[in-house]
Image: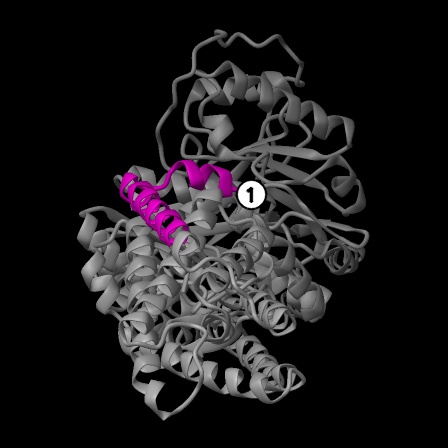
Amino acid sequence: MNVSGPRSRRDNVPSDPSGRGFPMSLLRRVRDPAEDRDREGDAARASAVSRGFVGLTALTTLAAAGSLAAFAATAGWHVDAPARFWLLALFVLAGELLPIPVPRRHGLDKVAVSTAFAFAALLCTGVLPACVVYAVASAIADLSARTAPIKVLFNASQYVLSLVGAGAVLMLAGASPPVALHAGVVIAILLAALACFVINHVLAGAGAALLARVPVLPYLVDDVAFHAMTAGCLLALAPGVVASSDASLALIPIAFVPVLAIYFGGRQAGINAHRAFHDLLTDLPNRYLLNERVTAALDAAEHAQSGVAMIIVDLDDFKSINDTLGHQSGDRILELIAPRLAQALGSRGHLARLGGDEFAAVVEGIRDETDALGCAEQLLQALQQPCELDSLVLHVGASAGVACYPQHGRTVDVLLRHADVALYCAKAERSMCAMYAHEHDEHSIDRLALAAQLRRGIEEGELVVHYQLKVPLNESGTCAVEALVRWNHPQLGCIGPDAFIPLAEQTGLIKGVTEHVLEAALRQSDAWRGGGLEIDVSVNVSTRTLLDHDLPQTIHALLDRFAVPPESLQLEITESRFVADLGRARTVLYELRAMGVTIAIDDFGTGFSSLSQLQQLPVDEIKIDRSFVMRMETDHDDAVLVRSIIELGRNLGLHVTAEGVETAGVHRTLRELGCDFAQGFHISRPVPADECHRLLVAMPLRSHSKPARVVPLRTPRGVHGSHGGARGAA
């Protein structure tokens, strides 16, 4: 066997859990598409080999050269049957170039049959010709695979020493090559074969261990039975090849035919083994191979006292793509995303597909949690560029959860579970990524309990609706309210929407939540109108609900039931979570708009809406995200952005509402900038319907302020502070 060093992190075969890789040409590395990427770094890896391997290569090369010189001086080059010699040489080369794949528990080994024909050449022609043939064939095979030069030299040298050792044993046993086969030389041939195996196994194993920087002796002992069995079978073929060649040279190719049949069978077995450990769609490792690789990474980290990060990446609202464009389009998106994530991860870790829209990455050599979060953010940044799918340009976002070894777990299952908990927290907080914390476990347990109780809560009327005022900033506007759902849990008290709306979306209960809020809001609107308050009410609609073809009929039935004019209802769509299927969403929105229902884009400025999208959608209003409004007094850039959005809305003929108004100064500036409505804690927090009614009665429905005029911004340039405060609308 020869060496290739430790297996690449990106080989498309299961890795050795020892982290050492597989020796080669009794065991040759699998060639697969990932190899082409691996070879790009061969030059760099060649310069990074350990000093121990360089020293071993130097000693092996000197010993091989000295041995060849000694045999050349004593025995010389004598080939009695040149045709047989060159025919054997041809099959030595063929055996090196066509190794037999052997699927095994930790990977796909490659057994090269060149050993049988090289040993046969030794028995037929002598040590020197056999060594030259074996060394040249090894070098040709390694160079064709673009192996690093130092490894090419080492492989050729250790092959020479293996045959030299076998030849020396034959001489000591009184059966100097060429050997005439008879019963008396059987023991000598067996001893020579043993010497060939031992020298090859020790040298190649030591070289691979030094490359992998692992202890040599455990490496040699590990799996020695398999190496001995394969080497014994191959070396046992050699006398048969010699006997066949003595009878007729035509029998030598015939002796190679069974080997060729085994090669094709092994190749198919290798393909099947690859499929068993890889995702058929993306060709990434699947969960089974991920477990193998994470186990190996944890073992290596424990030995090296280093860290490992487990990162789970989940695509945001991927179900909408499958539901609207079809699963085939969803599969194509996954095929586009997988190489981006793999390229972002690089050679530092392993990427796998867990299933559906979830990917997992294990990153070795983590310094601390900050380093792990940086790796997660790097993966997410790889998804910032839009995906082009036929004529569609889709922005596919994602969230990530991170757990680190050893502080967050010491086993694969624990790290995966904790990374999944962190992922849920990231989605619940609407942040890009989150690090696992111990208190999150309690949160995840609460989440499971909430999932079991949410359906019951909807059925038993535990969802309540609070209302937040939206006041006009000019003479033409009237007061309105936004309906915000809360869960009045019997044990946990009042739960905000961020704690259960993502859960409702994941479990398919969001439709029931939306219908409950619409019904409650329209019932309250009817009650207010009966008391003389003609108040417009807005309701947040999930992007998944927006893709429901039944939504217009549901809203139409509720409007008729409560006799509320359609123009008194507004639906808010969150821009940062806008749907992938713009066409289907547009159809639903136009149907709603035709009924008279108005449409608003919520959290404007945080998502990916373009002017062309705004023009394609029947939008009546844009709501500036509170994060910009809250910092208007301290951040010039945010103030400029708010003014630009107001001017954009005016130019497009849209109403503009500013969320997050928490001070009188911001309220006054927005009026001067020509903003239409204001909403935030400075005006009112979300309150129950009866308290909201008192607020509405206490204030005039129409503003009596002067007409808006646009004035220059007075916020100081260069000041970039941030103003705290909670969001007015959840």
Position of residue 391 relative to residue 656, above or below, is below
What amino acid type is highlighted by mark number 1? Glu
Residue 585 on image: x %, y %: 72, 57
Query: In the image as oriented, which residue stretches furthest toward the bottom?
Result: 183
Residue interval drawn in magenta: 41-70
Residue shown at 64%/68% (left/top)? 558
Residue 213 on image: x %, y %: 27, 49
Quadrant where the N terminus sits is bottom left
Q: Quadrant of residue 185?
A: bottom left
Residue 121 on image: x %, y %: 50, 71
Position of residue 137 relative to residue 655, above or below, is below
Q: Nearer the viewer, residue 306 or 574?
A: 306
Examine the rendering and report whether any part of residue 353 can be seen: no
Disc 1 is placed on an element classified as loop
Residue 18 on image: x %, y %: 28, 62
Residue shown at 66%/64% (left/top)? 330
Position of residue 182 relative to residue 332, above or below, is below
Say whether residue 62 is magenta: yes
Examine the rendering and report whether any part of residue 352 can be seen: yes
Q: Is residue 653 left or right of residue 43?
A: right
Name the dominant secondary structure of the magenta segment: helix
Q: Nearer the viewer, residue 476 or 45?
A: 45
- The image's colour scheme reads one colour
Say whether residue 248 is magenta: no
Q: How packed is label 1: few (under 14 Cα within 10 Å), some, or many (20 or more)?
A: few
Please give the residue where the numbered disc 1 appears in the rendered image. Answer: 40
Q: Quadrant of residue 418?
A: bottom left
Q: Is residue 54 left or right of residue 123?
A: left
